[in-house]
Image (spheres, grey):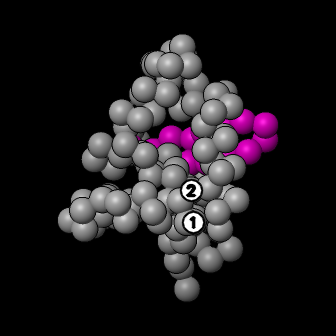
Amino acid sequence: MFQVVFNKISAAEMAAMPKELQLELLCEFQVMPQDLDKLEGESFGRVRRDGRQLYRCRAKDYRIYFGPHVEGIEVHRVLHKNTIRDFLFRSNLPMAEEDEALGRAGGFWELIHEAQGQR
């Protein structure tokens, strides 16, 4: 059976939102594990660094960072878009290539590693 698994940090990020917003984000997050290599469109992107890859889904004003999991899809982080834009601005990274720049930024991967330690 396919599941969307939230680690402790992404679950806390979702829980901090109003229930209606949670449902809206999950409705926009239509991803199946078998579709990961075929994700297209402006709503999806990939973040790569050091041989590691995460996927990004734009849902409303949020960015959902996720990857494959043995049970389906694991959500690593759910961040408001302004948080990422602020991060890129503070890091002096170009805004046009958001996903590529984000993948090169060590601070983003520290957020992901922090979440993995919270399982």
Q: Quadrant of residue 71?
A: bottom right
Mark 1, residue position? 7
- Residue type at the position of mark 1: Asn
> Residue 51 versus residue 15: which sits nearer the camera?
15
Q: Is residue 81 above or below residue 9?
A: above
From mark 1 to mark 2, how far is it between C-alphas?
Answer: 6 Å
**Residue 116 seen:** yes
- For label 1, the crowd category at 10 Å Cα-Cα, with few meaning under 14, some 14 to 19 and many 20 or more, is some
Numbered label attached to residue 45: none
- In the rendered image, residue 112 lying in the magenta stretch gets the answer no
Q: Quadrant of residue 21?
A: bottom left
Mark 2, residue position? 76
Q: Is residue 94 left or right of residue 48?
A: left
In percent of the image, x 50 and y 59: which residue is there?
10
Q: Position of residue 49 (x, y in %)?
A: 72, 36
Main secondary-structure element of the magenta-colored stretch: strand
- Residue type at the position of mark 2: His
Find the residue positioned furthest to the bottom: 1
- For label 2, the crowd category at 10 Å Cα-Cα, with few meaning under 14, some 14 to 19 and many 20 or more, is many
**Residue 103 seen:** no
- Image quarter where the C terminus lies is bottom right
> Residue 2 versus residue 26: which sits nearer the camera?
26
Q: Is residue 60 above or below residue 13?
A: above
Tell me whether the residue at label 1 lies in contact with that at label 2, contact meaning CB atoms closer than 8 angstroms: yes
Magenta segment: 43-55
- In the rendered image, residue 54 lying in the magenta stretch gets the answer yes
SS at circle 1 = loop
In percent of the image, x 60 and y 37: which residue is there?
108
